[in-house]
Image (tube, rainbow, N blue to C red):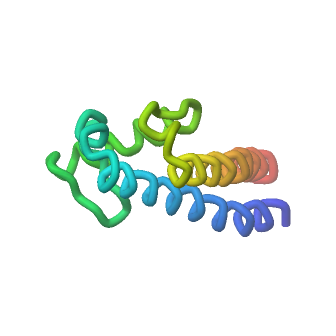
Amino acid sequence: MFLFAAVILMLPASAGARWSLHKLVELQHVDHHAEWEADGCPEGLWYFGKLPKFWGPARTEWLAWKWLFSTPAWARQDTEALRLLRRYRLCAAIGFPLVVAGVVAQALLG
């Protein structure tokens, strides 16, 4: 039962984190293009940048971890970017412990 509840709560948190990250990359691409290029042209969920398809998602995942713990300089003066970063971090803070709890519960309960 716990595993089911964790999965049910994890799905919207994970989707919220992914959507917020997508919108953040999109905002960076449109409003802070030089910084987007300096970050390696990361991809959003449906946007493909200049890099070959393999590197775009890898760059985005790297930035996802980086932005989880630090605010990029370009975002500090952009209120929309700060709002998206807060939402991304909140959803990740809710979703990640649920993933860990679900894995631990599955391992313990069989």
Residue at image location 42% in from the left, 37% down from the top: 74
Residue 107 visible in this rendered orientation of the protein: no
Q: Say which quadrant the N terminus sits in.
A: bottom right
Q: Of residues 46 and 85, which is closer to you in this image?
A: 85
Visible residue check, residue 11 = yes
Q: Which of 91 and 87 is in front in this view?
A: 87
Indicate left or right for 109 with 45 as reference.
right
- Residue 65 position, x and y percent, is 50, 36
Check the image and report above or below for 4 versus 25: below
List the single residue furthest toward the front: 77
Residue in view at x 25 percent, y 39 percent:
34
Side of 109 where 80 appears, left or right: left
Q: In this view, does 103 lie above or below 73?
A: below
Q: Is residue 88 left or right of residue 55?
A: right
Residue 76 x, y percent position in the rendering: 52, 37
Horizontal and vertical percent position of residue 106: 73, 52
Above or below — where is 30 with respect to 64? below
Residue at 16%, 46% (x, y): give it: 51
Is 71 above or below relative to 2?
above
Number of numbered discs present? 0
Q: Residue drawn at (73%, 51%), measured in percent from left and top?
A: 94
Residue ranking furthest to the right: 1
